[in-house]
Amino acid sequence: MREGVRAEIGSIAPIEGLRGVAVLWVVAFHYVALREAAGIADPWIEALRRMPLLDAFARNGYLGVDLFFLISGFLLGLPWFLHARKGLAPPSTRAFYARRIRRIVPAYYLQLVFLFALVMPLLHGRKYWRSDLYVDLWNAAAHALFVHNTTPLTSGSLGANGALWTLAVEAQFYLLLPLAAPLFVRMPRRAFAGAVAIALAWQWDVVHDMRVLVDGLLRLGAHWQWPESKVREVLGIQLPGYVAHFALGIAMGRIWLAWRERSEARAPAFARIAMALLALAFLAASLEGHVPIPREFARMAPTLALAALLWLAATSRGLVATRALGRGPLAFAGRVSYSAYLSQFPLLLLWDAYARDVPALAALPAYLVLLTVIAWVSRRYVEEPFLQAKDPGLERAQARD
């Protein structure tokens, strides 16, 4: 028996393209931020500055992470709703965990080896080898256990891959989903409202309170003199602050499943175009700070716009969306998005350090080509073999059932 969302639900082609959008958005954000931080004159960034709207989108590309969280909630909650509609037992927790481990761990662990054994020495040289061994060991253990987002000492991945904290949030969500998904099946509105309340309360407390947690982390980091602002920044990237993202995705998945069963449910093309334009306009307004929302919850406004765009993509049956998102470059970027996401930050740091002689106009295309090759190789020879592997113990359990 094949496992996974695709096996139970079928392919939702535009979602692959949305993954591509998300990873390219994150890549654009880091390209601009890291090149500017390194003081590198880049004609692509200069050209971007002359287009304010595109510049704003690129500089807010961290929101690609929010889109990834929405997609995870949307897809991973679907099997529980489908089983409930068919009157079946809930999906196997063991099968879910096994699938998630095969999906994210191999490429991630390979990235950690690359990070600690190659990137850090290349970036810091002898200084890296003279650093405190226990700091390196603490980082290695925290990353291996997906809890590296919990302290300032580990959340930045030693400055070599600041994007990895999101993997900790994702893994923690995977751990909780088999417990939370039945609640969304039995009482969807209350479960969703509870998740939103938790997220908003956490986001508010990160800014205004959490004195006990803040003081605890400050004592833990007294040797390194972590500023309180850094401690609060780390508290802001914990799972409770993002449960509304996942819950919104789960809720949309439930509604999508009901929509799919109503074959006549199809909005006119002009209505869908109008909805897409409104969502993009709201996204642009939120990025420019024109949406009146407390600063503690500022990230929630663009997330609502992204959720609307996710819904439109998932429910699209038109050729435009299918061709733009379901096939072609964006779909390819979506297929390799995980390995690309893992590699894009450290690769850019190495590129900026060792490829400064590359002609300025060629820097961005060359970096993207190299990233694409690395991502494809990782997808083909690391991700896919583990995804296709079978768990003998699970097969025996299924045979007994």
Image (cartoon, helix red, strand yellow):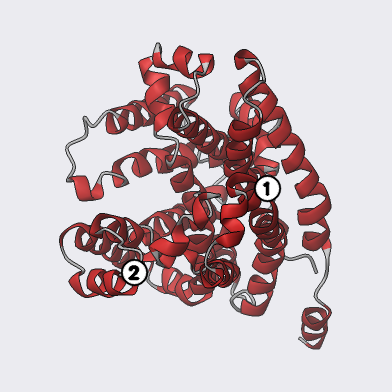
For the question of whether residue 315 can be seen, the reply is no
Residue drawn where x is 47% and y is 12% of the image? 47
x and y percent of residue 292 in the render? 17, 37
SS for callout 2: loop
Query: Looking at the figure, which quarter contains the C terminus?
Result: bottom right
Relative image position of residue 352 (x, y in whole percent) = 58, 32
Out of 289 and 132, give the one closest to the viewer: 132
Residue identified by numbered label 2 = 221
Q: Quadrant of residue 370?
A: top right
Amino acid type, residue under disc 2 in the picture: Gly
Of residue 46 and residue 82, the one placed in the foreground of this image is: 46
**Count of labels shown?**
2
Q: Which residue is mark 1?
A: 339
- Is residue 193 rendered to the left or right of residue 36? left
Task: Point out the image quarter for the N terminus.
Answer: bottom right
Q: Of discs 1 and 2, which sits in the foreground?
A: 2
Which residue occupies 21% across, 75% down? Answer: 212
Residue 96 left/right relative to 282: right
- In the image, taking residue 158 as reference, residue 197 lies left or right, namely left
Q: Which type of secondary structure does the marked residue at label 1 adopt?
A: helix
**Mark 1 or mark 2: whose residue is earlier in sequence:** 2
Q: Quadrant of residue 12?
A: top right
Amino acid type indicated by mark 1: Ser
10 Å crowding of disc 2: few (<14), some (14-19), many (20+): some
